[in-house]
Amino acid sequence: MHILIVDDEELQRCLLEGFLQKQGFQVTSAANGAEALEEFLHSQVDLVLLDHRMPDMNGDELLARIKAKNPLVRAIMITAFATVDTAVKVMQLGADDFLEKPVDLTQLLNKIQEIQEQLFISNDVAVIADAIHTDQLPVRMIAESRAMKNVLSMVLRAAPTPWTVLLHGETGTGKELVARLLHQLSSQKDGPFIELNCAAIPDNLFESELFGHERGAFTGADARRKGVFEQAHTGTLFLDEVGELPHPMQAKLLRALQDKTITRVGGETPLPVDARIVAATNRNLKEMVSHGSFREDLYFRLNVIEIEIPPLRERKKDIQELVPFFLNKLNSTITFDDQALSQLTKYDYPGNIRELEHIIQRTITLTRAQVISLRDLPDAIRRNSEHENSGKLNQRLAQIERQMILDALDKHEWVQTKAAESLGISERVLRYKMEKSAIGKKSGKG
Ligand SMILES: Nc1ncnc2c1ncn2[C@@H]1O[C@H](COP(=O)(O)OP(=O)(O)OP(=O)(O)O)[C@@H](O)[C@H]1O
Ligand SMILES: [Mg+2]
């Protein structure tokens, strides 16, 4: 982001310029309106910080002239004393915000960040998406579909920023892969990439996993241990399945993110930590917030940039590229004929890309053919087309219901409470339906 500072007071200019440069912005400054306009003509300025009162041309006039040249430029007006009058006038002239003198630097930074976030979101996603060459990415991934190109475009723009990214998508859509890509494309790529799966940590060990512990902090803590925040220092901390974070830990995580410091369990001194946070979930956090199971303030903290990774059934164009990609990954010379390939695109993939990868793996392991045709495909895929246009409504609905139940059970390791919750039905109704569709407690697994 390129910022232009316009102020006739040299001291003020130097102060602001120095401060903003230290924050990593590209900054130029001008001592008066004429200089500012000159600068504006020669470089691509994103934001102007301008003093309301200057000798040659007042801030209002300068802003109007700048806006005439580039209506998209953002502006923050700095006024000597803010009266409601000036504030309204300044906004009418097209300033995005105003600040009072003496400038409070934290406030200034906050306002700039706000503008930066708006700019980021309003930038044309499609333009960048078209320019992406996936073979130049540091992480190998397929993105043929428009939906995935848009995801990549968000990733490319989010990566260099320090903001927290929240990845949302069904199981197997590539959340972890995207998290790794964000890390590789960021300025902290030489630092560590540390992953914590929030669904896999027992409640009583959470705090120590996140923040570490001192020796003797609790029974069994025989040595000092670093938590993931410390391990990820100068790198990226990937909080996977963040929706599973127990409520008390949500408050502690929020505090760590706000203060950028942590305290080890049993420790006294807060330690500064500097890690870029990427979080992922397959849950609807917004809904969880409205039910009170996820803290709203933490949600907003994590959700500075949200990237939605679409399910494979909504980007079937990718399948044609994913098949050779996985065959290549498996070092296989086997190919799929057109009919088989086309059949693969008809299936809905509740397990998304991971499921497709498994299907390909299984198919080529089980076959003796060099070219896979329809009959070599697993039943689930072949059956898909037989049912596609046949059967009575009731039969088909029952089939779909049965499949959804099986998928939910499978996904939640056959924990019925969780499966029922994900299906939006009660456990009692789930049990009834399982009985009706002849799903045993463990049938269908494996
Ligand atoms: N666009 C892609 N191109 C190639 N491979 C991909 C792509 N997306 C995902 N994969 C592969 O699919 C598998 C699943 O991806 P990943 O583990 O990132 O999904 P996930 O969303 O984290 O799943 P879960 O919610 O189950 O943790 C991995 O082997 C990954 O490498
Ligand atoms: Mg994952």
Image (cartoon, helix red, strand yellow):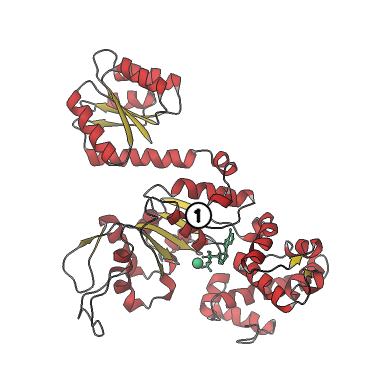
Q: Residue at x 28, y 37 (%)?
A: 21
| 180 sits to left or right of 221 | right
Vertical relation: 8 (above or below) 363: above
Name the image quarter holding residue 222: bottom left
Tell which of 94 and 429 is nearer to you.
94
Q: Position of residue 297 (x, y in %)?
A: 35, 56
- Where is ligand 1, by quadrant? bottom right
Q: Position of residue 109 (x, y in %)?
A: 29, 40
Dot 1 alpha-carbon crowd within 10 angstroms: few under 14, some 14 to 19, many 20 or more: few
Tell which of 111 and 247 is nearer to you.
111
Q: Looking at mark 1, is its residue's CB closer than 8 Å to ligand 1?
A: no
Q: Which residue is mark 1?
A: 138
Total of numbered circles in the picture?
1
Name the image quarter holding residue 228: bottom left
Identified by mark 1, the residue type is: Pro
Vertical relation: 347 (above or below) 108: below
| 118 sits to left or right of 137 | left
Query: Mark 1: which secondary structure?
Result: loop
Tell which of 182 and 349 is nearer to you.
182
Q: Position of residue 37 (x, y in %)?
A: 36, 18
Q: Residue at x 81, y 63 (%)?
A: 339
Residue 398 seen by the camera:
no
Q: Position of residue 38 (x, y in %)?
A: 36, 17
Residue 190 seen by the camera:
yes
Vertical relation: 329 (above or below) 439: above
Q: Give the quadrant of the C terminus.
A: bottom right
Name the image quarter holding residue 194: bottom left
Q: Residue at x 76, y 69 (%)?
A: 384
